[in-house]
Amino acid sequence: MGKKSNCGELEALEHDLLKHDCSIGQILKERGVSRRDFLKFCSAMTAAMALPASFAPRVAQALDEVKRPTLVWLEMQSCTGDTEALLRSANPTVAEIVLDILSVDYHETIMAAAGHQAEGALDKAIADFKGKYICVIEGSISMKDGGIYGTTGGKTHLERARQVCGGALATIAVGTCASYGGIAAAVPNPTGAVGVRDAVPGATVINLPGCPVNADNLTATIVHYLVFGKIPALDSHGRPLFAYGKRIHDNCERRPHFDAGQYVEHWGDDGHRKGFCLYKMGCKGPATFHNCPTQRYNEKTSWPIAAGHPCAGCSEPQFWDTMSPMYKRLPNVPGFGIEHTADKIGLGLVAGAGAAFAVHGMLNALRKDKEPAEENKEG
Amino acid sequence: MSDNCKFKCYIWELPVRWCHWINMFCIVLLSVTGFLIGTPFSFGSSTSSFTMGWIRFIHFSAAYLFTVSVISRLIWSFIGNKYSGWREFFPLMTDAGRKKTVRMLRYYMLLDKDVPETIGHNPLATAAYVCLFAIYSLMILTGFALYAQHAPQGAMHKALGFMYVLFSDQGMRLTHHISMWFIFGFVINHIYSAWLMDIKEHGSEISSMFSGYKFTVRKEK
């Protein structure tokens, strides 16, 4: 990312701000991306944004002309999985280059600069392009004890997030941790981890949850901004509707087996080999909103359910706490011991009530009742 | 409990009886289909069968019928006779109701031997029905909130938006599931109590829910 570009006067330092004058079309041409590949990319992005195919030329035209925005990428409490998802594609793709040339002025994991030089680049980027740059945040933000459990360059993550997100055009929270706190926020949440929206309440935040984020959705979100000049429509959890507007269960390739009543009963059984529905193996597809079935991961190679594993519900808020146990349909009942399912408790309740009334009935059968007293008569 | 000739009183009007039996029918249907949805077995013989599809269709249709029935009963509690009125459900609000509650409690706890005669609702029963209506509301709200997720951003999904704030998705499933067991607990209590009072009161407790008539020592005022 942010490698040398041959456009313009080209003083190609990592974060040379002069590069901002080139359009994406020009840069792609210089990178050796054919027009055909570029148009294929535009069609794929149009589909990812759930727009009709007739929008593809408009996307191409907009990307041809648009000036690339500045982007800074901050790492908080994260495993860098989202960066990995973005970088480890098998072949260099147009999408990769589009993100690459997005003038990534600051990316902690992959930038060459270090120390004060790197911090200087960040300060310069957010000062020169105040209100115009896009901020991408990966990882949750620690809030407990003033946020001291996560620091970079001597500043807490909370302080950096407030400083950088506050002046950004928009903040894209990539991955479940940046969106909702993710695994770091799971009970007992020792660092008081939260997502960007909770850490910086005033900022414009687009959540792209998932573990990891689907790089196609990140590219499409940025392309949407480049084409339309505004952020995409969001749902109540701050997620773009084009990517999170439908339930996995409703677009799942195994859905016909669900409706038919054909289920995997045990790992590796006949149904599992035949690709039956993973509902009974604890699949959280019916509770999860994401475009995994259509967009898939790693250049549309596969996704968990296609690979025979139930959906873990990773793109939903508090998924680690609310979606567990991973291989069971329903959560355990809180307040009871582990492995106490709703059905065991319910059966106990019904058996208890039945026994109590049986005893009451027997006691009643043994005793002799009296005529109701005068004041006990109604009517 | 009387050797006297009894008077017959019309207690349960037709809408009350209809709601009662529709509710019962729906609860049986919803429990059976709901249990199969929660814990299915591989009942599909081929990929072209639609067994789970039909089970869910029956569940959702019965859910609509049940909801209409519960709402109708709530409306009837404002327009029906005094025995079906909403005041019956809050016996502790009146002096007579409080006395009657204490007498019923003492009888049920085997402390008193004289059977407190009741024409309309027994105050302990109405207390249970208030809890039951709360469970019904929870069932209807969690059920339709889960159902509405097939069409996110649709009218029902938006109208039930507050449910997705109050519950996590899986929490909603757990609540919907465990509430079924609470209703089973109620059903055991309900059938036992009706049977017991039919035996003790000699007032046609059970058949009154078919005919609408109960029999009392004194004539209805």
Image (cartoon, coloured by chain):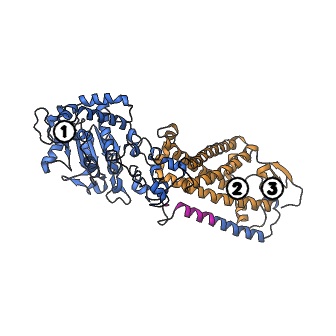
Rendered position, B118 above or below B108 = above
Q: Nearer the viewer, residue B104 or B210?
A: B210
Subunit ID for the residue under disc 2: B
Residue placed under numbered mark 2 in the picture: B123
For disc 2, the neighbor class at 10 Å (few under 14, some 14 to 19, many from 20) is many
User: Which chain is painted in blue?
Assistant: A
Q: Residues within 10 Å of mark 3 (few under 14, many from 20)?
A: many
Residue A331 location (% of width, % of height): 48, 58
- Quarter of the image where the N terminus of chain A is located: top left
| Residue identifier under label 3 | B204
The reply to whether dot 1 and dot 2 touch (C-beta < 8 Å) is: no
Q: Position of residue B99 (x, y in %)?
A: 71, 58
Name the secondary structure under disc 2. helix
User: What is the spatial separation of the Cα atoms under label 1 and label 3, in whole angstroms?
Assistant: 85 Å
Is label 3 or label 2 in front? 3
Q: Are marks 3 and 2 on the same chain?
A: yes
What residue appears at the point 79 percent right and 64 percent down from the top-left corner? Answer: B114
The span from disc 1 to disc 2 (Cα, nearest Å) is 72 Å
Q: Nearer the viewer, residue A222 or B1?
A: A222
Residue A29 visible in this rendered orientation of the protein? yes
User: Share a chain, discs 1 and 3?
Assistant: no
User: How far apart are the alpha carbons under marks 3 and 2?
Assistant: 18 Å
Quickly name the residue at label 1. Answer: A127
User: Chain under label 1?
Assistant: A
Q: Which chain is orange?
A: B
Task: Examine the structure image and report whether residue B19 is included in the region drawn in magenta.
Answer: no
Give the camera-side residue of B101 and A90.
A90
Disc number for residue B63:
none
